[in-house]
Image (cartoon, grey):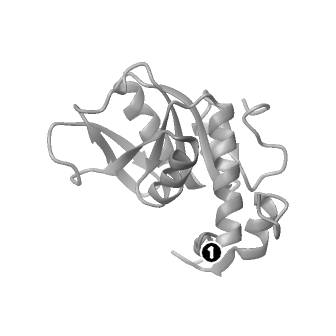
Amino acid sequence: MSAKYANGREAIADNIRYVQDFPQEGVLFEDLTPVLANPEAFHVIVDELAEECRALGAELIGGLDARGFLLGSAVAYKLGLGILAIRKKGKLPPPVITEEYELEYGSAALEIPAEGIPIKGRKVALVDDVLATGGTMYGATKLLQTAGAEIAGHVVVIEVDGLGGRERLAGPPLVVLGKEGDSAVDAS
């Protein structure tokens, strides 16, 4: 644990950058880049994400394209687990398993390799930086379920309230570090 920060919420609050009217007018963008660039804040965030994934019983960490790769890789390393990069469509050579899903502004697709990685029956914790509408996390959940994995839970650094992401992910536990009271123990 960092000597400077007692917990992830404190590290986030001290380092997050707010950008008004980005990516469009009326949106307040919560930029985690300064949090991840601060070594003490990054350390406490990774430690807490790892603890939550451990509590969920994760056997593999799924990192969502692209910031989830950064966080998920550090978590997997800390836990001595592997990292599964869940990629945007068209980034992996065939054969792949693809899941298309709806976003608030259209549709998208995620992919994982169809062979070479034992996924069936494994408990996977999905890690990302921000939960907003939940579209990408939902797509990743469906993708891994199609591949035969069990979703241990969804673990994110922050959540944008009021966009329905939490409701869209009903089922496996959702843990948000930047939210008071959320943990793998009491999440539903």
- Up the image or down, 44 lies above or below 107; here it is below
Image label count: 1
Q: Nearer the viewer, residue 11 or 158?
A: 11
Residue 61 visible here: yes
Name the residue furthest top: 121
* Viewer-side residue, 137 vs 87: 87
Q: Position of residue 26 (x, y in %)?
A: 62, 75
- Residue drawn at point x = 52 percent, y = 41 percent: 80
Q: Nearer the viewer, residue 140 or 20?
A: 140
Secondary structure of the residue carrying tag 1 is: loop
Q: Position of residue 48 (x, y in %)?
A: 70, 50
Q: Which residue is mark 1?
A: 26
CA neighbours of label 1 inside 10 A, class few (<14), some (14 to 19), many (20+): few
Q: Amino acid at mark 1?
A: Gly
Q: Residue at x 84, y 50 (%)?
A: 180
**Place of residue 136 in the rendered image (x, y in percent of width and height, measured from the top left):** 46, 48
The quadrant in which the C terminus is found is top right
Which residue occupies 52% across, 29% down?
151
Hey, which quadrant is residue 125 in on the image? top right
In the image: residue 103, left or right of residue 110: right
